[in-house]
Every structure is written in structure tokens, then in C-alpha cells.
Amino acid sequence: MKQLLINNFKCFRNIEIPINGLTIFAGANGNGKSTAIQSLLFLRRTIEHCAKWEDGQYQMLEPGDLRVELNGAYCMSLGTSSGIIPHSSNAKSLSLGFQHEDKAFMVDYEVEDNKLWLKPSNVKGGDTLKDDPLFYQEFYYLNAERIGPRLSQTIQFYDFPNTGFKGEFVAQLIGDAESNYSFKVDELRRNQNSKSPRLEQQVNAWLDYLMPGVVVSANYDTETGFAQIKLENKYTRGRPIISTNIGFGISYVLPVIVTGLIARKGSYMIVENPEAHLHPSAQSKIGQFLAVIAESGVKVIVETHSDHVINGVQIAVADKRASSNIIQTNFFDQLEGSDQPNIEHILLNDRGELSKWPHGFFDQNQVDYRSLIKLRMNG
């Protein structure tokens, strides 16, 4: 298991966050989950700036006089450098990196006031963890604010097949017949309700698992430069309709399914709020899907506010579709008097049982139920 190392970045003074095959970030708003993801994204962006491309992946170099932007890349909106250092610190530098056993990779950054960038000043261990998937070309990130239903999506070039940060390439990936017939979904990721290894068939098999009766197809037209998603369900009776006539849930979950099916084994797949716009039953099933993807070898990192997603992961483990030893839940919380968020580490056993249940960890149903009983008794 690796540790994500964060020093003097936003709300964190000095923290180590375990990263496993499926890593779940949970906790109340404003407790550092997004900051942890941003630290990983900013580290990735630094590698893209300060590394050379060689033998199919990035090779880290000394940063020289390069600067890394705080806004734009990977949908990050970090503002200016003056807001990056924790308010409780007077430091003029920060560090981000990874540690695995006795090996560490760390980047130090100089922080000047009111700049739109940070300057990497030192790289330590660039060769020791060069095989970490952070250095792969394939790196998948899905922002919490994905695009909703659209009449069409623009066809674009990409360095490697991916759905984009907001799902903007989904129609292109599904509709590109040439790519579909040459690509086969990893056997470990296939939904057993479809015998076909093709992407479109597997997307629809998993989509039907989440939302019974829903089928997607895509038109891909290089002459107009557009691709279009169409949908069917039990009410359309075999007549596909444009995606704008059905709600947000399908358009929000499609990038998650497609990314999981196409992601390179060993690479990072970061998903914010996979449960967005989904019915609770579908939320549970997307948790099961992500556990299956992680079991196949993709390094999945999920930020979620859904106990149903957690339940789905537990079900996948209890059902032997995912191994308990690849699951790591990090619960972000506050401690009285602490100058940074506290992180509780929660594990699963082979029966899908949590190793602990901290106060505030998806216990709102019980809290509300107790409140209702009290109110009814006093009424």
C-alpha cells in the first residue's frame, strides 16, 4: 500500500493518506477530501510539466525554472499561491509526493505571494518510483461536475482513449466503430450478462445492471465533427431518443462505466461523486462496479457522500467479486484543537464488514430515526 504525502497544502499541514487498489474518500463537506484529490492532480500536472516522455511514460527531471499553473488543468481552481499554504502556517514552501515501503518520491514547491502558479524547486526520488502509475500516459479523472445531457458532443483528438474530465468524449468512444471492433474489454471487467467483449455491448450490459431496460447507442460522424448519444428504455419501445429527453443520471454515470471498462490496468482512475443523480439502488451497484474494476487491477480513487456506494463495495467483497485487502476507506473528520483534518482508516474483512464505524461516518439515518422517535414521543 502506498502513502500520499501532503505537507503545507491547503488544509493539511502534514498528512499521510493510504492509497490502495480501491481507495474511498468519505466525510463531511469541508474536511479535506477534495484537497487530497487536488494534491494528487497537482502532482500529476507537475510531472507533465517537468518530465520528459520516454519509453511510453514520463521520466522525471529536475524542474529547472518551470512553473505549474494553479487553475485550469484537471478542472482545478486553486486561486492564487497566497491561498495554498494553510492559514495556521507561515511557511513559504510545500511538498507533495508518494511513499511506498522504503521508497519515496517528493516534489518541493516555492510559494511566492499572489501568483497563479507554484514553482517546483526540488525533486527527490524521481527514479525510485518511476514505475508508479502517476507516470503513465494513461491517467483518468472524472470531475464531480460532469456534463449533463447534450444533443451532441464534439469529436476531438486525445493522446489516449478517455472520456475527458467531464465525460465530453463518451459519445465519441462509444460511436467510433473502428475503435469498438479493435478493443476488447478486460475479461475481469465484463458483465456476465453479455458474451460480447466489445465496448458498446459491455457498457450496455453494465448500464442495464444499474438501470434495467436502459440501452445507449452513439452516432459518430467525422464529416460534421460531432458524435451523438441516443437512448432507449422500456417506454420508447425500440425507438431511440436523444439524450436530452432523459434525465441527468445516465449522462453522469456513463463516463464512470466507460472509463472503468477502458482504463489501462495499473493506472489511476479518480472519480468524484460517482453516485450523482442516481437512485439509491444504482448508487449501490456503481459501488459494486468500481470494486470489480479495482479487482481487475485499475487503481480506483473515489470521493463519495453516499452510504449506498459503500454498501455496494461491501456487497462486492462479501460476494467474492473483489478482495477485501485492496479496499481502503479514508474517513475525513475534525478533531477538537487540531490544526488539520483527521483521517480515520477503515478496512473491510472478507465478509464485507467494516473494521470500525467512527462517529459521523454515514450514520445520519440512525441520527434522524432517533430524532423522529424522540419527537413522536414528546408529541
Image (cartoon, grey):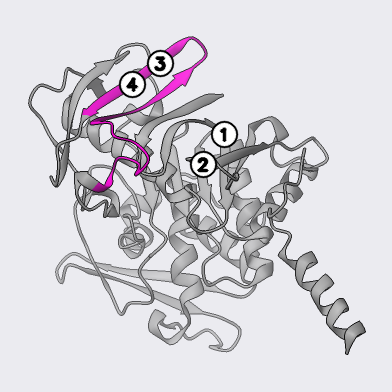
Report the residue marked by disc 3: 104
Q: Eyeballing the image, is 131 above or below 226?
A: above
Q: Which residues are magenta?
A: 83-109
Residue located farthest toward the left when viewing the structure as drawn: 65
Q: Are marks 4 and 3 in contact (CB under 8 Å)?
A: yes
| Label 1 sits on residue | 21
Secondary structure beneath label 2: strand
Q: 184 left or right of 358?
A: left
Check residue 188 for magenta coloring.
no
- What amino acid is at disc 1? Gly
Q: Secondary structure at mark 3?
A: strand
Give the labeled residue for mark 2.
Answer: 300
Q: Residues within 10 Å of mark 3 (few under 14, many from 20)?
A: some
Mark nearer the N terminus (3 vs 2): 3
Single out the mark in the foreground, 2 or 4: 4
Please tell me which of labels 2 and 4 falls first in the chain: 4
Proximity of marks 1 and 2: CB atoms separated by less than 8 Å = yes
- Image coordinates of residue 131 in percent, x first then y, are 38, 19
Between label 3 and label 2, give the one nearer the viewer: 3
CA neighbours of label 1 inside 10 A, class few (<14), some (14 to 19), many (20+) = many
Judging from the image, what secondary structure is the residue with disc 1 in? loop
Q: Residue at x 10, y 21 (%)?
A: 64
Q: Are marks 2 and 4 in contact (CB under 8 Å)?
A: no
